[in-house]
Amino acid sequence: MSMRRRIAVSTVLAALVGLIASGIVAVGLVRTAYDAQARANLHQQAEVLATAAESGILRPRLVRRTLGVQYVRVLADGTGAGQRLPGDVVAAAQRGQPLSATRTIGAQRYLVEVAPVPSGGGIVAFQALSEARAVTSHVYRRLLLAAIVGLGIAVLIGVALARRLSTPLIRAAEGAHRLATGERSVRLAEEGPYEVAEVSRSINALAQALGTSEGRERDFLLSVSHELKTPLTGIRGFAEALTEGVVEPAEAGRTIEAEATRMQRLVTDLLELARAGADDFRVDIAPTDLVALVVDAETVWSKRCADVGVELRTELPATCVVSTDGGRVRQVLDGLLENALRVTPAGRPIVVALHDRTLEVRDGGPGLAPEDLPVAFDRSVLYERYKGVRQVGTGLGLALVASLVRRLGGTVEAGHAPEGGARFVVHLP
């Protein structure tokens, strides 16, 4: 059964159950009200009959014609009761005691009212319960008609509601199927109740996110292809020149080696980035002395910095031991230092600062614009933005740093350094 039909059927069934329940209650209330009214009328008639009996003007035919009830005059000695009336009714009439009850007389139920006569005895007025309730049949027909009309309205409302709820959901399902087949231009009308419209909004957001993500993937692949093509072209050109003897072997070898190193760095970054996102990425958590780790890194990087005229400084506490993967933290630090050294000009500093569980790398390079900070760790975004403007790497280094930090359970953010360049802060858990 389709969703639209299920909603319509459910609505109609709910309305039907509600109508049946309310009908049962309404019938009970109507019956109770009319029984009470009939009893009150019969009581008044019994009192009128008692007054007439006391005055001696009681006329049986006139009573039947005007009041439409049956009555019996019971004297104090029981005379006139006949054999039809129940004993407790006759006894009450003999004593002149009022009585209001429902009794079986013969094979039929009657409303019975006893009104005392001042001179003695009483009047017993009785009316068949079926006669008293005859007037309610008209009310019941009206109630049944109202129930039928209500059910018809419920069917119309159920169909309209089913259409209103199911149409956006059906469109959302169709949009999801189109997304699954690769169509990214899917946009749905955000209509219907809030929850249903929220489904359409979510699918629209998903389509936009997928389009943006795939666009970045395409740009990334184009960038990687270009980066691989450039050194390959250089290697091939120098290889041909070497074959033809138009360049010195040493010069060709240096160029080929440099271009091969560049290719190796790009491929290594790609592999590390892929490994960082894998489910089986290994993290070995152990007590790690971050101060010793930074000192070891300083020993390696200070010479590289000095070779290009950049000063490497450290700001370290006396001790800082945390539970983390020291090898991965060193990989993060190396990535940040490589990024900083690439953009820092000679005569400007690079600072590695450590306090508590926070590792900072600051540089005196050109820094980042405010709009760069939210996308600093997205693959190839800064690479594409600053390619040809400043020295850039493979476009993967900061993305790899962010992936490693996330796998360590920490966070990383970019900002502005007091040295005038960029500031990268790693918060370890």
Image: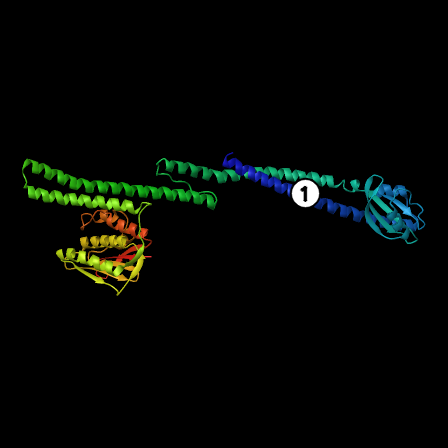
Q: Secondary structure at mark 1?
A: helix
* Relative side of 339 to 120, left or right: left
Quarter placement of the C terminus: bottom left
Position of residue 36 measured from the top left corner of the image (x, y, whole percent): 76, 48
The answer to which image quadrant residue 59 occupies is top right
Residue found at x 18% / y 56%: 300
- Let me know if residue 427 appears in the view: no
Q: Nearer the viewer, residue 311 or 73?
A: 311
Q: Nearer the viewer, residue 305 or 278?
A: 278
Scheme of colours in the image: rainbow
The answer to which image quadrant residue 305 occupies is bottom left
Up the image or down, 108 lies above or below 115; here it is: above
- Let me know if residue 22 appears in the view: yes
Residue found at x 25% / y 43%: 220
Position of residue 346 measured from the top left corner of the image (x, y, whole percent): 14, 57
Local crowd size for mark 1, using a 10 Å CA cut-off: few (<14), some (14–19), many (≥20): few
- Which residue is identified by label 1? 24
Up the image or down, 126 lies above or below 338; here it is: above
* Relative side of 124 to 384, left or right: right
Amino acid under label 1?
A: Ile
* Relative side of 99 to 378, left or right: right
Position of residue 202 measured from the top left corner of the image (x, y, whole percent): 40, 44
Position of residue 73 measured from the top left corner of the image (x, y, whole percent): 90, 47
The residue at the far top in this view is 1
Q: Nearer the viewer, residue 91 or 63?
A: 91
